[in-house]
Amino acid sequence: MVKLTCLLKRKPGMSPEAFHEYWRNHHGPLIVGSRSGSHVLRYEQNPRGLDDYRDGDDTGYDGVTVQWFASMDEYRAHMAEDDFPLVMADLDNFLDVDHLEFVVTEEPLVVIDRMPADAG
């Protein structure tokens, strides 16, 4: 299993509400409907809670996204699809791409697991 984890910061001038709405209702469905997204086993959007923002506080990140792939070959295949550039171009519509941070990881080392068996 391979996971792509990205730390997301909204583009300057965009409100937190507009950022989360665009990410949820436009960018997510764009990935789901793409050939590039067909290589993704699981796609998570982990938004920063709106109540965590303070007046004038534009520091920190606005969310984390995690995409799961069966293998490194599948991760590379998703980037090789002909619609991958379209998905990437959409990032400019809502992200500060200069502050996009990502890491590709393999199987985790679970140190504590107190999650109930039926947890998401």
Image (cartoon, rainbow, N blue to C red):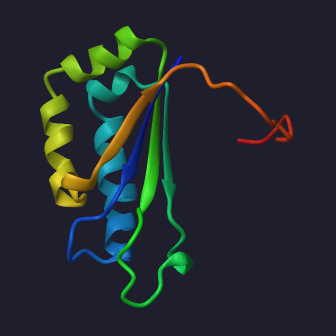
Residue 11 at x, y percent in the picture: 22, 65
Residue at the image point whose x is 29% and y is 21% from the top: 78
Residue 18 at x, y percent in the picture: 32, 72
Residue at the image point whose x is 23% and y is 23% from the top: 79
Residue 61 at x, y percent in the picture: 41, 62
Q: Number of numbered discs present? A: 0
Work out whether 117 lies above or below 30: above
| Residue closer to the observer: 76 or 26 | 76
Work out whether 67 lies above or below 7: above
Quadrant assignment, res 56: bottom left
Quadrant assignment, res 83: top left
Q: Where's the C terminus, which quadrant?
A: top right
Work out whether 115 lies above or below 47: above
Which residue sits furthest top?
Answer: 73
Residue 103 at x, y percent in the picture: 40, 34
Residue 112 appears left or right of 99: right
| Residue closer to the observer: 16 or 106 | 106
Quadrant assignment, res 26: bottom left
Residue at the image point whose x is 19% and y is 30% from the top: 84
Q: Where's the N terminus, which quadrant?
A: top right
Residue at the image point whose x is 59% and y is 20% from the top: 107
